[in-house]
C-alpha cells in the first residue's frame, strides 16, 4: 500500500531571487500630464445646469397652475 497523504506530495516551486529579479517597465513610457481645471469654468457649467433646471421646473409649475385655474373655471360654470 502507498501512503497518499499531503506529506508525500513534493512540489518544486521556485521563488524569484531578489538579486536577479528585474521589474518589468510599464508599457507607456510617456509622462502623464495632469490638466489643471479652471474654477470659473466649473462654476459657469454649474450655473448653466441650474438655470436649465430652474426653467424646466418653472414650466412644469406654470403648467400645473394654469391647468388648475382652467379646471376651477370649468367647474364653477
Image (cartoon, rainbow, N blue to C red):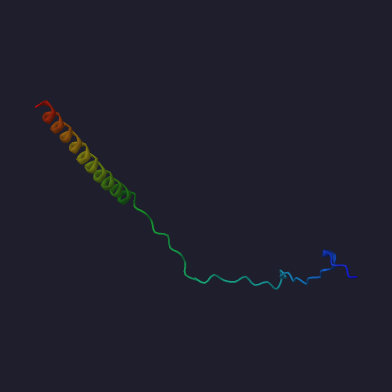
Estimate the x, y position of residue 21 in percent, counting from the top left: 68, 71
Relative to the observer, which residue lies in front, 22 or 2?
Answer: 2
Q: Is residue 54 left or right of residue 13?
A: left
Question: Which corner quadrant holds the N terminus?
Answer: bottom right
Location of the C terminus by quadrant is top left
- Vertical arrangement, residue 43 with respect to residue 33, above or below: above
Q: Which residue lies at the image location 34% right of the left edge and 52% below the top edge?
A: 38
**Residue 50, above or below 16:** above
Considering every residue shown, the one lying at the far top of the view is: 76
- Position of 21 compared to 1: left or right? left
Q: Which residue is at 28% across, 47% downward?
A: 49
Quarter location, residue 5:
bottom right
**Viewer-proximal residue among 46 and 68:** 68
Residue 70 point in image, percent of width and height: 13, 33
> Hey, which residue is sitting farthest left in the picture?
77
**Position above or below: 9 against 70:** below
In the displayed structure, does residue 40 sit left or right of residue 10?
A: left
Identified at 85% across, 65% down, the residue is 7
Foreground residue among 20 and 54: 54
> In the figure, 58 relative to 37: above or below?
above
**Residue 69 coordinates in the image, percent (x, y):** 14, 31
Q: Is residue 9 left or right of residue 26?
A: right
Identify the residue at horizontal 11%, vertical 31% (top origin): 74
Query: Percent from the top left, x then y, of residue 56?
Result: 23, 43
State how many labels appear: 0
Quarter location, residue 75: top left
Amino acid at each position: 500500500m502507498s501512503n497518499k497523504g499531503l506529506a508525500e506530495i513534493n512540489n518544486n516551486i521556485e521563488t524569484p531571487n531578489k538579486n536577479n529579479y528585474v521589474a518589468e517597465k510599464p508599457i507607456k513610457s510617456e509622462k502623464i500630464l495632469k490638466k489643471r481645471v479652471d474654477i470659473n469654468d466649473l462654476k459657469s457649467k454649474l450655473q448653466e445646469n441650474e438655470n436649465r433646471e430652474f426653467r424646466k421646473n418653472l414650466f412644469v409649475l406654470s403648467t400645473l397652475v394654469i391647468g388648475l385655474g382652467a379646471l376651477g373655471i370649468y367647474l364653477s360654470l
